[in-house]
Image: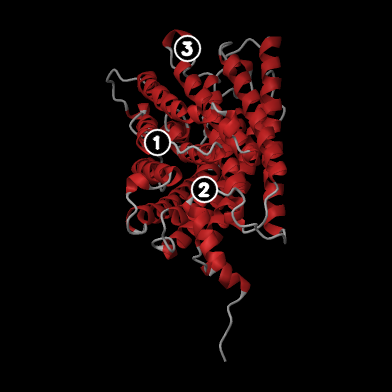
Amino acid sequence: MKNESTVVERIVTTTESATLSRYWMVSALIGLLFSSVAGLLVSLERIDLSTASIFSTADDVFQFWTAHRVALVLIAVLPLMIGLATAIVPRQVGASRLVFPRMSAFSFWVWLFGALIIIIGFLANGGVGTPEATSETQSVALTLVGVLLAIIGICGASTSVLTTIVAGRAPGISLLNIPAFSWSVLVAGTMWLATLPVLVANTVLVYVDMRGRAPVNFGSEAVVWEQLSWAFTHPQVYLWVLPLLGIVAEIISAAFKNKISNPFLFTAIGLTAAAGFGAYAQTYFDIGTPVFEEAFSIIQAFIAIPAVLLVVAFISPKIKDLKGFDKQTTTPAVLATLSIVLLLHGVVVGAVHVIGPLELATRSTVSAQIVLTLGAGVLACMAAFSWWGELLIGKSISQRKILISGLTFHFGVGIFAVADFLVGFTGQNDFTGVSEFAAGTDGSSWVETLNVISFIGSLLILLGVIAAIATTVQHVLSKTPATGNPWGVDAPEWKSKEKEEVA
């Protein structure tokens, strides 16, 4: 008698790209929720810096402050991008399935295990160390192990997707003819594989020095974040959201029924990728040479601006003729447009905050740039779910609910970023601790007002994330089947779905 596999066995052993995509995206939304809650608590603490109200010490604030950024990148934004690529890329390049499907599946479980360890490490008074070294060293080491596992999982899944594009695409399809999203994933994934191993090296160096004896230098809790922070700030954050350019190009092109020129768009994506390479900008290892973080950031900012403007230049002509706009595509087109607007604002803020005389390089303006850029990536994923949702989950999609979630999130990001950008000019530091002295402000009513506005933005971000999770769960549990090609577009991913239905 043939033994049938159990539900748990089927969940754990599946190599189907659509199923793995859902695993990635649902898990990433939970990670985004964790990051949003951490950010909200820090924003709430900043409202009154005269005393500790939410957290007992500045080190507690530091742990949640870093948890917000680490989780936003490694547990939310990157997994969301990989989840989209896992399902959409094979269809776009004409592959029957992902290359190395078992490695792709194994990579997800490695990442998930690492993500859980990261969260546990932060909650167990660990994280990436604290300035006053009051955290639990064992929990810090545990968090670092989680970071390593999460990166290994991300790199493994990226390798599978990249190999599918390069070696698994259908005969007759050249790399210059693949859809914009697949190209952006190819460029982004290549850069991820070029920079994430550097973060691994940093983490291993810290971990080895921390374990077994008193740390010599790198493993000291007070300097751990200094060695890892480059991966969670300007300009590296551009790389984490790079696929959003492909998402926007796909949606806008279809919404206005006007194909965007591949060579120019692909060049723009490549230039933006070059602008985002930040692995070398590690001032912790500066041994006295006249190299400063501001210099790195200025170079990257002025490369990024023309790159993003070039993308906008080739997307904007498509939206000039409003008569050609397909009203059916309103939700994905609106969210995609707002995501590129957030990215452009993030690039501008990134350029402003490194102007020497303004002295913003270590101010709250840094947080504004990070949230704008990574928020743009999340919003682009919402637009992608609106556009490809029926491919991702095989169920009918409610565009109105996705639009409400996306708009709430967008306004939250915008309000938070404006407040943090302005409060940076008052002298408020990026990390405020729990005192006016650490924050670098005089505690004026103007500063308190901006911090209240920033908190409101954080609250709206959290509400947008909760709404997105509720909408996703509702769609996954829905019994209403997908309607085929809801947009009527001539795109390879939708053609492959039509062939499957006919078969």
Q: Disc 2 marks which amino acid?
A: Pro
Can you say whether 100 is above or below 38 in the image?
below
Q: Residue at x 53, y 70 (%)?
A: 503
Residue that mark 2 sits on: 79
Residues marked 2 and 1 touching at CB (< 8 Å): no
- Helix, strand or loop at label 3? It is loop
Density class for disc 1 (Cα within 10 Å; few <14, some 14-19, many ≥20) is few
Residue 197 percent across, percent down from the top left: 36, 45
Disc 2 to disc 1, C-alpha distance:
29 Å
Residue that mark 3 sits on: 359
Is residue 418 visible in the rendered image? The answer is yes
Can you say whether 230 is above or below 432 in the image?
below
Q: Residue at x 54, y 60 (%)?
A: 498
Residue 49 percent across, percent down from the top left: 67, 20
| Marks 2, 1: nearer the viewer | 1
Q: Quadrant of the N terminus?
A: bottom right
- Helix, strand or loop at label 1? It is loop
Residue that mark 1 sits on: 261
